[in-house]
Amino acid sequence: MKILLILPPMTQLNTPYPSTTYLTAWLRHKGYETVQRDLGLALALRLFSRTGFERVRANLEAAEKKRRTAIPVKNFLKEFNAYFDCIEPTIRFLQGKDPSLALQISERNFLPEGPRFAPLAEHENLLEIFGAMGTQDKAKYLASLFLDDVADVIRTGVDPRFQF
């Protein structure tokens, strides 16, 4: 017998819920062939991709004008090529598949910066706290702001129920 354990979509993305992992290990220990799938991660990877961004843009362009003129949406559409070009490398970086990107991200010349980056201008020393923690942590923080910007775009312009 083959068993499939599914973690439903829209659960915590950055800290996997351990239930399926424990259950998978126990079932395998008992001799069952067990596979686990994280539908939340699968959904996020589809959405935060070039193809996903093209679909988001198409939805935004078809949306009513009120939604298209909201600041996060306006910024996303204006800077679409920059968002499009950096989304897949940024996801690879966050997955630990391309740590070399940390320097470019942490120097703030790689990611388009939408409204979520505004507090950084107001608090110049905010990013200095990462000096002791390192470039990787600073880059992860900035990449997370980038994804939060995109989530705001989706929530504002496509689906008001969307959230991480």
Image: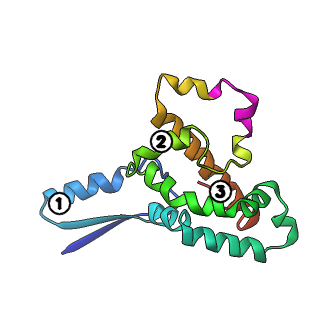
Picture quarter with the C terminus = bottom right
Query: What's under tag 1, amino acid-wise?
Result: Arg
Magenta-highlighted residues:
118-126
Q: Pinpoint residue 110: horizontal percent, then vertical percent.
A: 58, 48
Question: Quick one: SS at disc 2?
Answer: helix
Q: Earlier in the sequence, mark 3 or mark 1?
A: 1
User: Magenta part mainly helix, strand or loop?
Assistant: helix
Foreground residue among 29 and 158: 158
Q: Which residue is mark 3?
A: 150
Q: Residue at x 81, y 54 (%)?
A: 71
Question: Quick one: SS at disc 3?
Answer: helix
Question: Quick one: SS at disc 1?
Answer: helix
Q: Which residue is mark 1?
A: 28
Q: Residue furthest right?
A: 66
134 shown above or below 85: above
Foreground residue among 65 and 27: 65
142 shown above or below 161: above
Determine whether label 2 and label 1 are within 8 Å by CB.
no
Q: Which mark is residue 114?
A: none
Q: Pinpoint residue 43: horizontal percent, then vertical percent.
A: 50, 66
Report the side of 7 relative to 24 (left or right). right
Q: CA gap, disc 3 to disc 1? A: 39 Å
Q: Residue at x 23, y 66 (%)?
A: 34
Q: Which mark is residue 102?
A: 2
Q: Residue at x 58, y 41 (%)?
A: 142
Q: CA gap, disc 2 to disc 3? A: 19 Å
